[in-house]
Every structure is written in C-alpha cells, then in structure tokens.
Amino acid sequence: MRKKAILITGAAGEIGDALIHRLADSYSDEILTLDLQPMNAEVSRKVTHMQGSILDKSLVDRLVSEYEFDAIYHLAALLSTRAEFTPDAAHQVNVGGTMQLLELAAQQSQWRGEPVKFIFPSSIAAYGLPDLDTKHAHPQVREWEWNDPTTMYGCNKLYCELLGGYYSKNYKQLSAEDPIMVDFRAVRFPGLISAFTVPSGGTSDYGPEMLHAAAQGVPYAAFVREDTTIPFMAMPDAVDALLDMAAAPRENLSRVVYNVTCFAISAAEFRDQVLKAFPEAEITFKPDVKRQGIVDSWPMDTDDSLARKDWSWEPKYSLERCFVEYLVPNIKNRYTD
C-alpha cells in the first residue's frame, strides 16, 4: 500500500528549507524531499530525503510505486544566471523535470480519484520588457502583460506555467464536466531574500549578497546600476504565499498563475538599508552587462491584486520590518563567532 506524503523537489534550496520547517508543524503524514544535495542535519530529521535528480526516471518511478502524493511542491530549478551559461541543461531540468512530475501528478490523480495539488514557484523572469522607457512607463505589470522573457530561465518558467495550465484545464478532458487531472497553481515571485541561506546564483541576488558581504566585513561590488529597481520579498512571505495559495478553495481561483509582491526598491536604496545596519560596509556598483540587461527586462513592480482578491494574499514583511526584524538580526547572528 502506498504511503501518503507531500513531495518537495529542490528541497535543499532557499525556499525548500523554509517550507519544510512550516509544513513539518502542520502536516501529519510523511514529507518526502528530493534534491541533488543532502539535506542539512536539522531539516533531515523532519523529512524522508532521497538524493537524486528529477530527471532520473527510475527514481521517479520508484516514488510512484511507493507513495501517494497529496501535493507536490516543485521547487527544483536551474536558476537564471546559471541557466544563461548552460541553456540546454536548464531546459532539461526546468522543463523536462517539470513535465515528468506533471505526468506523475496526472497518473496519481487518476488512481486517487481526485487531483493532486501541484504547487509551482514561477518568477518575475517570465516577464520581458523591451527597454527602460517601457519599464518606467509600466511600473506595475499584471500577469498577462509583457510575457516575452529574455532569458532561458524566464522562457522555461513561462512554458512550465503553460504546461501546468494545460494539465489542469485540458489534459484528458473531453468536456467541461470532466474532472481536472492536476490542480496546478503557480506564483510568480519577485526577488526573494532569505536570512538563513546563502544566495545561490539568482539574478536578483545582488541585494542579499550586499547583506552577507557587509555582515562578514568584506567589500562587495553589485553587478547592477544604482538605479536598478525590481520588487523583493522576504522568504517567510514567500512560504506564506505558497501555503496560502495551496490552501485556497479551487473555486475561489480565477487563474492558475498569480503575481505576489511586497516592496519595490532600487539597488541604491537597498545599499542604504544595508548601511543602516552595517555603517562600515563597502558597497560599490560594477554593472555586468549581461546580468544588467536581464534585470532591466524585469518590471519595476508587479500587480498582485488578483492574489489579494482571490485568496486573501497579504505580505507581512514591509521594507522596514524585513530588514529590522528578519534580515539584519539573523544574518548578523550567522556570522557571529
């Protein structure tokens, strides 16, 4: 008999670490994690971890034979900067891996007689504004606007959103009365900032990299211009968004993909917040042409009014609270001997 479980892929990453802590407090059945990396000792006590790749078909087949999934949180991905250097690998992981898991979810939905929830973190990288004039003319972007990404990562995320919509709305559904196969739900995140994990190659990581460098007392040159503006969100709010969207009644959802956001801030303003906590920090700006071009194609902010309306989304961490209560004390503590 299959064991009931929640599956979290990419669980050793920034979102996975925070998500596991929250789910472990509320979910009574098994939490199964999958990642290329081992889990840290604290988290490993709360989960059953399988170390391996989502592209390993034999491993995925083993999961199917042993577990019945209530939900899949598919966090595994090759992030934006790295994906630009290895686009083929990014496509295999980000699209091929998602496709394999959507198939798994569809099979399990048939066996269960009810849809598996498939929770997917998408990204602001799914947008692509053509130039800075357009970016400034459209300071808040809605879900269906400017879906013309300029990166492999953004293309992958947008395509996976479309695949999820297909499996949710059309796969093996001959009429409107047929039940949905997969309950796919995606959130488009802004730049995410964690106090407990080190930045891992995202194009928005210039912000958290400033903080970690300042806390260690080492100089840091941001890879963007001072005026670069995008939205950010504290990791606890990101986890809240995933869990709140997962908990929302299906009939309340008007979309399968939702924006969520918190505060939009320029790189210079981010530096100023860091200097309030670390006055001696040496932070300069040395734009990298490629990465700057990517960030310039992302909106200054996103419109998350539909998430607020449909499933009562509301972030808890304002700019000030994010720095004063969450980021600064925890990052200071990380580097205290």
Image: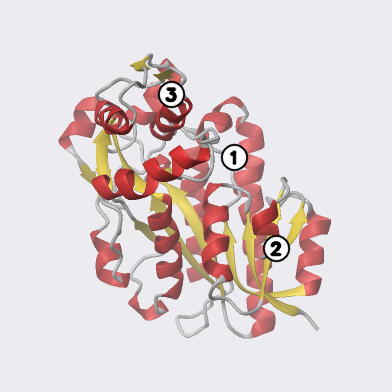
Q: What whole-number distance in Å separates the C-alpha atoms at marks 1 and 2?
A: 26 Å
Residue 36 point in image, percent of width and height? 72, 46
In the rendered view, would you say 128 is above or below 95? above
Horizontally, residue 252 falls left or right of residue 123, namely left
Q: Nearer the viewer, mark 3 or mark 2?
A: 2
Q: Mark 1 sits on what residue?
A: 78
What residue lies at 80% left-to-right and 73% top-to-bottom?
66
Horizontally, residue 63 falls left or right of residue 96, namely right
Q: What whole-number distance in Å separates the C-alpha atoms at marks 3 and 2?
A: 38 Å
In the rendered view, would you say 146 is above or below 24? above
Q: Which is more toward the observer, 265 or 2? A: 265
Q: Which mark is residue 9?
A: none
**What kind of residue is marked 1?**
Leu
**What kind of residue is marked 2?**
Arg
State yes or no: discs 1 and 2 in contact (Cβ < 8 Å). no
**What kind of residue is marked 3?**
Arg
Residue 4 point in image, percent of width and height? 69, 79
Residue 301 point in image, percent of width and height? 26, 43
Secondary structure under badge 1? loop
Q: Mark 2 sits on what residue?
A: 45
Q: Nearer the viewer, mark 1 or mark 2?
A: 2
What residue lies at 51% left-to-right and 35% top-to-bottom?
335
Q: Which is more toward the observer, 202 or 171? A: 202
Secondary structure under badge 3? helix
Mark 1 or mark 2, earlier in chain? 2
Q: Mark 3 sits on what residue?
A: 291
Horizontally, residue 13 falls left or right of residue 249, namely right
State yes or no: discs 3 and 1 in contact (Cβ < 8 Å). no
* Most distant residue in the left direction: 137
